[in-house]
Image (tube, helix red, strand yellow):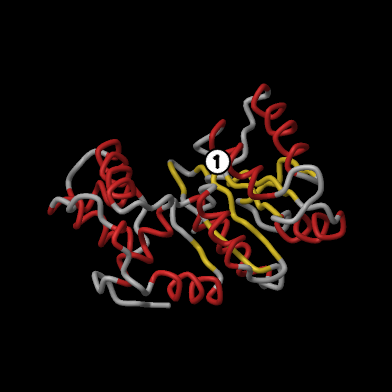
Amino acid sequence: MTTQSEGTMDIIHVFLVDDHEVVRRGTSAYLDMLDDIDVVGEAQDGQAAIDRIAALETEGQLPDVVLMDLIMPRMDGIAATAAIKDRWPSIDVVALTSFVEEDKVHGALQARATGYLLKDASADEIERAIRDAYAGQAHLDPEVAKRLMQSLRAPKPQDVVEPLTEREREVLVLIGEGRANKEIARQLGISERTARTHVSNILGKLNLTSRTQAALYAVREGMVPDAR
């Protein structure tokens, strides 16, 4: 949702990565109609995306969210997502693909993608995924979420290296409810930095690689209702 501060609208800066120009043009044309979303650049493959985002950084115009196709020549979307998150952790990546492949889903989440959508998603759904990513919330296509829940159903011995503290369990519940770090901090009366530390500790203890996996874990363990 658009937020305003002292009468100024927050602008979400978006970068598009897809090897099909017609897809980039169509997505860009839709997003350009939205007052608070600005497409700051595009690229036809992962390596080109990294190069162009680096150029934007020198101009002080880093994107907030990258819409990333997963299957591309030269450098695919999973490798590009990992490289972007390593170099620019503040950038959120929403993965896009034509069909659900479990290895691609897990690969994207391990690379720290914030969301995962199928390319047949509606324009409204893509817009919602961008806004959720900007707010620090995971956004998954329902079919993708279903596949991930199925893959998480069987308890695994390595799921818990050491027990979570009571505070970490509270944080995990809020992650499962889709809360961003800022919301977690506000609700628990802690700093946002402390909230990030708790999230990092939770991922480490549960052998998970992303907030999305943590949210699904919380649902699987019955800590929050399965709203999917």
* The furthest residue to the left: 166
Q: Count neighbours of disc 1 (C-alpha within 10 A) and say few if under 14, some if 14 to 19, many if 20 or more.
A: many
**Taking 53 as reference, is 23 left or right?**
right
Residue indicated by mark 1: 91
* Horizontal and vertical percent position of residue 30: 74, 61
Task: Examine the image and state in which quarter residue 51 appears.
Answer: top right
* Viewer-nearest residue: 109 or 134: 109
Q: Residue at x 63, y 49 (%)?
A: 78
Up/down of 185 relative to 227, above or below: above
* Horizontal and vertical percent position of residue 70: 69, 55
Question: In which quadrant is the C terminus drawn?
Answer: bottom left
Task: Examine the image and state in which quarter residue 126 appears.
Answer: bottom right
* Viewer-nearest residue: 145 or 138: 145
Q: What kind of residue is marked 1? A: Ile
* Horizontal and vertical percent position of residue 116: 57, 62
Q: Report the number of numbered marks.
A: 1
Numbered disc 1: secondary structure: loop
**Taking 196 as reference, is 1 left or right?**
right
Q: Residue at x 34, y 57 (%)?
A: 179
Q: Residue at x 57, y 62 (%)?
A: 105
**Taking 26 as reference, is 97 left or right?**
left
